[in-house]
Amino acid sequence: MARDGAIYTCQACGAVHTKWSGQCSACTAWNTLVEEVQASRPPGALAPTRTKARPGLAFETLDVETPAPPRIVTGMEEFDRVCGGGVVPGSALLIAGDPGVGKSTLLLQAAAAASLNGASVAYVSGEEAVEQVRARAQRMGLAHAPVKLAAETSLREIAEGLKREHFDLVVIDSIQTLWSDQLEAGPGSVAQVRAAAGELVRLAKKRRTAVVLVGHVTKDGQIAGPRVVEHMVDAVLSFEGERGYPFRILRAAKNRFGATDEIGVFEMGDSGLREVKNPSALFLNEGGERSAGAAVFAGIEGSRPVLVEFQALVAPSAYGTPRRAVVGWDTGRLAMVLAVLEARCGVGLGDRDVYLNVAGGLRVTEPAADLAAAAALVSSALDQPLPQDCVVFGEISLSGDVRAVGRTDSRLKEAAKLGFTSALAPTSSKEGGSTPGAIPTAGVARLADAVRRIGDGDWK
Ligand code: TYD
Ligand code: MG
């Protein structure tokens, strides 16, 4: 029989069940239900309360001028921009990323910058001792920043501390290390993470303290423990980077106070993260001839154009099932491009190994990259390099058409600025491409036209 007050929480989706079972009925994951014992509620806590002070729902109209929320500007421009122009007081932020990607480094720097900008800032580490955090700050040259440090994992202590002293901004590193003595579950479990996040978000609103929570991501890309934290906070920023590359990208996955397609680019060095203010040339392979299989994609990340090299290798397969390996792009999208190349252009790569890599460790999600990926694949398959000075962009449809994409002018202008002199792009962008400073475009209406141009070396 279930114990009094016992509930079972799915560690994958956070669904709550009253009985244990092998499979979660909400998300169908197996063996994820874990018993949690809740602290007994005070009697009558759930009874509906009605007081004279609250007459019911009060409705308002839409046409009232609301001033833009004030912001805590850290002065770390890349960070501020991804937040939507600084951190909103009283809001809760989650910074999610793989262990070791640099979350603590980023937030220590942001905290230091904000404190130097006049905000009162605390950094609470549950993972490292104060000495370790201090040593790191000193190594990064931030010893003079008036940030208050603490090492604590008890939710009760942290909450008490935040009630005692007011801060504009508090960093909690990390949410998975916190524990509440109200719960029996261990730190990092759904129950603990939810309780800690809930309490901190409530405190944030009440005390108008912006709370930044650090969350580790599990191997399969989920924010460890629950996704429940994502729903509680105002913004979720993911901090990404490929191992072996110094570049780190801060990306907004959710933001109640700003755009979600904005990215911040950083470079990890010996003394912490350096902001990369103009990242457009960062993801290009420097130096030498562009070889067969390389295509420069003129992309847009957030509000900025970014040029990035797509590298493809098409090789004879040694095994029955050819390999498909992709870094920095979507596997499903690659399968689609390969299918369209085969069905609409007669370029069959079904029996060959295909490798596709986005240079520099960037993850590209724009559909406009289709044509760049296709061009890299065709160039490798035909062993025919693209012109050195050519950028590529365009979306490919299943019918084999090359569709126009947004912000053509920004793409072409940025390419021109970096010394590119031609573009392989949708025909329709040619008409719009009369902007001064943009480069001439070899327009293609169908993917087959692009394949022919690459094969013939025809770039007129
Ligand atoms: P860290 O911020 O501790 O990662 P996280 O909090 O996401 O787990 O950063 C860890 C890595 O960053 C570590 O492998 C060392 C590297 N690093 C540098 O290269 N330079 C530096 O100045 C710092 C502080 C860290
Ligand atoms: Mg850390």
Image: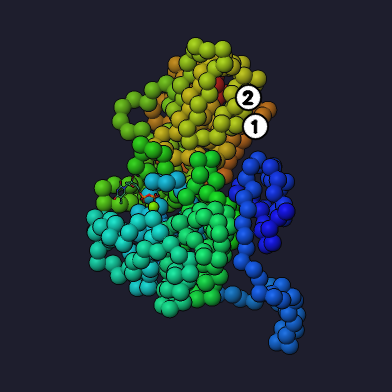
Q: How many marks?
A: 2
Which residue is disc 1 drawn over?
Answer: 397
Which residue is disc 2 drawn over?
Answer: 340
Q: Is mark 2 within 8 Å of ligand 1?
A: no
Q: Would residue 53 be found to the left or right of residue 283 on screen?
A: right
Q: Position of residue 63 (x, y in %)?
A: 67, 74
**Along the viewing direction, whichever of 364 and 404 lies nearer the viewer:** 364
Query: What's the residue at 38%, 60% (across, down)?
Result: 125
Q: Residue furthest bottom?
A: 52
Q: CA distance from mark 2 to mark 1?
A: 8 Å
* Residue 183 in which image quadrant: bottom right
Query: What's the residue at 51%, 70% (across, down)?
Result: 204
Q: Would residue 198 be found to the left or right of residue 315 on screen?
A: right
Q: Secondary structure at mark 1?
A: loop
* Mark with earlier residue (2, 1): 2
**Along the viewing direction, whichever of 91 and 207 lies nearer the viewer:** 207
Query: What's the residue at 61%, 66% (across, down)?
Result: 39
Q: Is residue 251 visible?
A: no
In the rendered image of this protein, does residue 444 appear above or below residue 88? above
Identify which amino acid the numbered label 1 is placed on.
Ser
Mark 2 surroundings: few (<14), some (14-19) or many (≥20) residues within 10 A: many
**Along the viewing direction, whichever of 61 and 379 lies nearer the viewer:** 61
In the rendered image of this protein, does residue 363 appear above or below residue 15? above
Identify which amino acid the numbered label 2 is placed on.
Val
Q: Residue furthest front?
A: 1
Q: Secondary structure at mark 2?
A: helix
Disc 2 + disc 1, Cβ < 8 Å? yes
Q: Position of residue 345 (x, y in %)?
A: 61, 19
